[in-house]
Image (cartoon, rainbow, N blue to C red):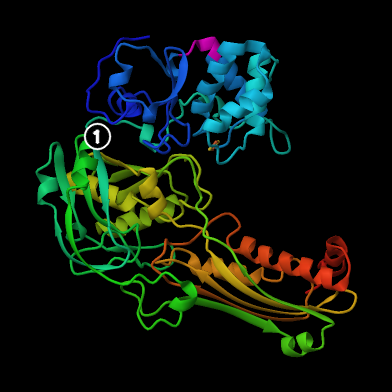
Amino acid sequence: GTPVSVRADHPHLLAALREELDVTSAKDGCSPSGQCGCCTVMIDGKVQISCTYSVEKVAGRSVTTLEGVDADERQRFADAFASCGGLQCGFCIPGIVMRAKAQIDKKGADLQRDDMARHLGAHLCRCTGYVKVLDAIEAVAKGTPVDPHLPGGVGTSGAKYEAAELTLGDRGYVDDIRVPGMLHAALHLTAHVRADVKRIDTSAALAAPGVVAVYTAPDIPGQQYVGIIYKDWPVFIGEGQRTSYAGDVLAIVVADTKQHARAAAALIDVDYDVLRPITDAVAAITDPEVAVYGTKGNVLSVSAYQRGDTDAALASSAHVVHEVFQTQRIEHAFLEPESTLAVPQPDGTLHVYSGGQGVWDDRDQIAAILGVGNDTVTVELVSNGGAFGGKEDMSNQAQTALAAWLLQRPVKCTLSRDESFRMHAKRHPIRMEYEAGCDEQGRLTGLRVRAIGDSGAYESVGMKVLERMAGHASGPYRIANIDVRAVAARTNNPVCGAFRGFGANQAQFAMEGVMDRLAAKVGIDGWTMRKRNVIHPGEV
Ligand code: FES
């Protein structure tokens, strides 16, 4: 509803909206790929994905974002999503609301649920799922009365905290925050997962339009390595050092705009001696070459325990299953890519806005990098657009804080989806060899487990995940004789770390597979097999 003019050089409409006009209800989950739907707006009354829409094409046309929707209509959507439980982190919801609005404008109370579900095919929601979202849209379309009250206390149900603000895109995530004088940063990631870095030439980046500074490893005043448990994850890989995975950072570029920072980061010229990447976790354990720079070997941890006589138990079992179960690496795919804003304070401290999952860990690690006391750094949690464990490790917090600290100016850095995929930890792929026996009635007699998890390059919490996998190896079943050994291997693959379930999921996949196979051998159904073996309170 307001005539505006914007620069012509934005890569897409979403960038013009967010970066120049500070219209932030449209979220950036994957620009410019148009895959997530978070940036959906209306152009001349039709829904469009704004990160695939050029600025030239929008000239002279009417763009409606959630900010421009009629106040009563906004309230109807906010109330419906709040009372139906149609959101969790909320990052995907403003885009979904725009899509729903367009459909309701067209069809009103006749909007069919199936039809709306089909239109939601253009949107990804990682945390809520789509059923409650459809409930909320249906309530708006049909004008069903809703009651968005907050919970009254423990044991009562009610709307999610900040549900209305989240639905309308008004509750800012880190990338939505703007502060006066804010600069923008972009990272330069390695081109090779395992390579010696001979030379890093930042001169072209420094001379690029709008660039204020470029920082590399020698600019770190304190510690170079971070990590939640062990400090083996480098903030930057410097000249004379070696890269170990695709998310390794070589430099951070700070500029007046995000676009200038990104363009300049691409100009950094690096000489590499490329080395053979070590990508097979099983082979890595016996590989004489060390996969990860600065470490002594490729075995990160061994978690082992045993009880009883497993050999004898298996030898005397009526039925035995011996199989290998392999799970895959899994990406958390939270909808909000990582973002950090660091703001130097007049009292000489640094205030960092982080969407991470451990603000105290972030604070301690940032302070160590800057070489200052913990009380010089404050990390404020900004509720994020999904994490699921994938934001426990720091992503760009350290580099962003460093740039702001050295420049004594506010600096924000937001990862692209590609960078996010490359940098943060995943769920471990685990190879699990299970050998299990039972008697004629299907009662478990013994279990041997040999597991190797691909922990990727850096420690993160990899050894704890394999420890948990080992601890849950037998599932919820009573087994007198057990022998378990789980190894976390270092490779040059993506770092693996925390992810909902934390290693137990993989073990259940294998153990439940074993239960089904044994049940078939005994000739009983899976339910009976489980009922005969499930552990009861007081049993070991
Ligand atoms: Fe949909 Fe979080 S609520 S991605």
Give me the residue at 43% from left, 37% from top.
29
Label 1 residue near ligand 1, CB within 8 Å: no
Residue 365 falls in which quadrant of the image? bottom left
Which segment is the magenta one? 69-73
Q: Is residue 6 above or below residue 324?
A: above
Q: Where's residue 199, x and y in %?
A: 15, 63
Q: Is residue 272 left or right of residue 22?
A: left
Residue 63 falls in which quadrant of the image? top left
Q: Is residue 432 left or right of residue 32?
A: right
Relative to the observer, which residue lies in front, 468 or 250? 250
Relative to the observer, which residue lies in front, 33 or 456? 33
Relative to the observer, which residue lies in front, 159 or 135? 135
| Mark 1 lies on residue | 182
Q: Where's residue 463, x and y in %?
A: 50, 70
Q: Is residue 513 above or below residue 426?
A: below
Give me the residue at 43% from left, 72% from top.
490
Residue 134 falls in which quadrant of the image? top right
* Figure quadrant, ligand 1: top right
Give me the residue at 50% from left, 26% from top.
94
Residue 524 belongs to magenta span: no
